[in-house]
Amino acid sequence: MARLAEFEQKHTHRLVPTKYAGAGVLESLPLTAEVISDLSELDAATNERKIAEAGKNAAIGPSELLFGVPEARIVNAAFSHPGPYGARFNGPQRGAWYAGFELETSVAEVAYHRRRFLSDGRIHNRYTYEYTDFLADFAGRFHVLEGAERESCLQPDPVPQCYAASQSLANKLLFEGSNGIVYPSVRRPAGTCIACFRPALVFYPRRGSQYQLAVEATTDAIEFRPANS
C-alpha cells in the first residue's frame, strides 16, 4: 500500500500551453461591451472551470478551488478540465495538478503526449508548440508508491488503458483524504513527478519562462528552447 511521507519541494515545473496561459481571450477582442457580455455568458455556461467555480461540478467546487490569488485561474483549470479519459492519477471527473521536480522531467512528459497526439493523427510533420513554465512549491504529507504499486501504476502504455490501476488507487486515496502522490516519472525515469489532489496545496503558483517545444511522431528527438531565442 502507498505510504505517507513528508515532502518539501520548491520550484516544481508544470508546462502549460501559452495559448491557455494568457489573459481572457474575449476581453482582448475588438467588440462592444454588450457583445462581450453576451459571449461571456455563453462561455460561463460551457467552460468547465467556470462551471466548477460556480458550484455546478459535483467532483470539485468553490470550497476547494482558489479565488482572489495570483494564477487562481490556471490552478483551477487543472482540476476542472480532467480530459475525457483523465490522466495517470485522476479520472475524467476531477483533475489534478501535475508537475515535475525538474524542468527536464516536465519536458519529457509533455513531449511524449505531443508525439502520441501526432502519431494518432498520422501527422508526420514536425510541429512546434509554445509553453509557459508554471512554478509552484509543495510542503506536506504525500503518498509514495511502493513495490507492486510501482509496477502496476507506472505502466508506460497503452494510454489510456494503462491508467486503470493508477486511477483506481488515486480515487481510493483521494476519498481517504490524501493530498496527492509523489512518483518516479514514467517518461523520464531519473526524474520525479507530483500529482497534487488539493488546489490549496499548490503553493505560490507563478510564471516562469516561456519555451518552444518541437516534436515529431516518428522520432524521440526533441528540440526545447526559450521562446525568444
Image (cartoon, helix red, strand yellow):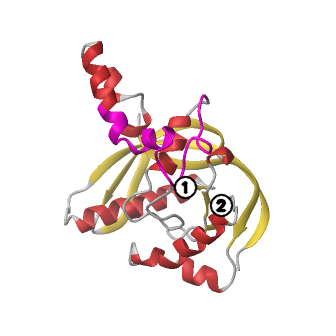
The numbered dot on residue 180 is: 2
Secondary element at image label 2: strand
User: Looking at this view, is 161 or 213 the one in front?
Assistant: 161
At label 2, which amino acid type do we have?
Gly
* Number of residues whose C-alpha sits closer than 10 Å to that of mark 2, classed few (under 14), some (14–19) or many (20 or more): many
The reply to whether residue 29 is in sight is no
Q: Position of residue 62 (x, y in %)?
A: 57, 41
In the rendered image, the residue lying farthest to the bottom is 148
Q: Residue at x 48, y 55 (%)?
A: 107
- State left or right for residue 6 relative to residue 212: right
User: Which amino acid lies under the numbered mark 1 shown in the image of this protein?
Assistant: Ala
Q: In terms of image quadrants, where is residue 42?
A: top left
Q: Are marks 2 and 1 in contact (CB under 8 Å)?
A: yes
Q: Is residue 13 above or below residue 156?
A: above
Residue annotated with mark 1 = 96
In the image: residue 136, left or right of residue 112: right
Location of the N terminus by quadrant is: bottom right
**Above or below, comparing residue 36 to residue 161 in the picture:** above
x, y percent for residue 167: 52, 71
Residue 108, magenta (yes or no): no
- From which residue to which does the magenta span run? 42-68
Query: Percent from the top left, x then y, of residue 137?
Result: 69, 46
